[in-house]
């Protein structure tokens, strides 16, 4: 899964199907289940002191947030292969960087939405400080990004290849 600047999210067919199945579950059986939990908790009496009711309502809120996220993601999704890279770091690429020019201190990661992070490779969002710092740079370029303490760090782009995961 990758995101492009036009706010299109590229998904494999498998990823699209998985997310669509999750959305269908959350808007069907999961909504029925949470409504039943809320109804059962209401019957226990005073809602101000009813922990089960408050927990069920919180779970419902999280579930509805996920429904909105999935709906938006799938509305902007395109199934297939993202456009060919022009050699610049972009979402959907596996990027290898060296910290502060030290070619022994490297990090390889997938630049993609964390929505589809893989256990096979570390994933950085294009909106993360490191992700946005390397975005658009080409192999051999130096890039800067801001650390949480406000200082700047620089990295050298060693490799950028499309993800074939």
Image (tube, helix red, strand yellow):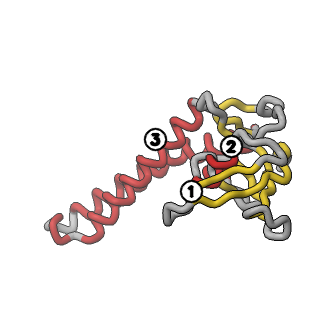
Residue 60, x across and y down, in percent: 37, 54
Mark linked to residue 68: 3
Mark linked to residue 135: 2
* In this rendering, position of residue 165 left or right of residue 117: right
Judge the density around disc 2: few (<14), some (14-19), many (≥20) Cα neighbours within 10 Å.
Answer: some
* Mark earlier in primary sequence (3, 2): 3
Of tags 3 and 2, which is closer to the observer?
Answer: 2
- Estimate the spatial distance between the alpha carbons at disc 3 and disc 1, rounded to whole Å: 30 Å
Helix, strand or loop under label 3: helix
> Which quadrant holds the N terminus?
top right
Evaluate if marks 3 and 2 touch, with contact meaning CB atoms under 8 Å apart. Answer: no
Foreground residue among 50 and 140 = 140
Evaluate if marks 2 and 1 touch, with contact meaning CB atoms under 8 Å apart. Answer: no
Residue 22, x across and y down, in percent: 58, 47
Q: Which residue occupies 33% across, 65% down?
A: 55
Residue 11 figure quarter: top right
- Residue where numbered disc 1 is placed: 146
- Estimate the spatial distance between the alpha carbons at disc 2 and disc 1, rounded to whole Å: 14 Å
Q: Which residue occupies 61% across, 54% down?
A: 145
Evaluate if marks 3 and 1 touch, with contact meaning CB atoms under 8 Å apart. Answer: no
Foreground residue among 20 and 147 = 147
* In this rendering, position of residue 128 left or right of residue 105: left
* Mark earlier in primary sequence (3, 1): 3
Rendered position, 12 above or below 42 = above
Rendered position, 138 above or below 57 = above
* Mark earlier in primary sequence (2, 1): 2
Rendered position, 150 above or below 25 = below
Q: Which residue occupies 22% across, 70% down?
A: 50
């Amino acid at each position: 899964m990758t995101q492009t600047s036009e706010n299109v999210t590229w998904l494999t067919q498998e990823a699209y199907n998985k997310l669509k199945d999750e959305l269908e579950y959350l808007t069907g059986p999961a909504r029925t289940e949470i409504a039943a939990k809320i109804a059962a908790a209401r019957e226990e009496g005073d809602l101000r002191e009813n922990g089960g009711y408050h927990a069920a309502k919180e779970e419902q809120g999280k579930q509805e947030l996920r429904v909105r996220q999935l709906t938006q993601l799938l509305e902007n999704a395109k199934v297939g292969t993202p456009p060919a890279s022009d050699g610049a770091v972009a979402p959907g690429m596996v990027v290898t960087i060296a910290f502060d020019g030290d070619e022994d201190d490297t990090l390889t990661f997938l630049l993609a939405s964390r929505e589809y992070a893989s256990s096979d490779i570390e994933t950085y969002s294009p909106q993360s400080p490191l992700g946005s710092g390397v975005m658009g740079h080409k192999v051999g370029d130096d890039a800067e990004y801001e650390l949480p303490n406000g200082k700047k760090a620089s990295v050298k782009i060693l490799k950028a290849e499309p993800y074939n995961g």
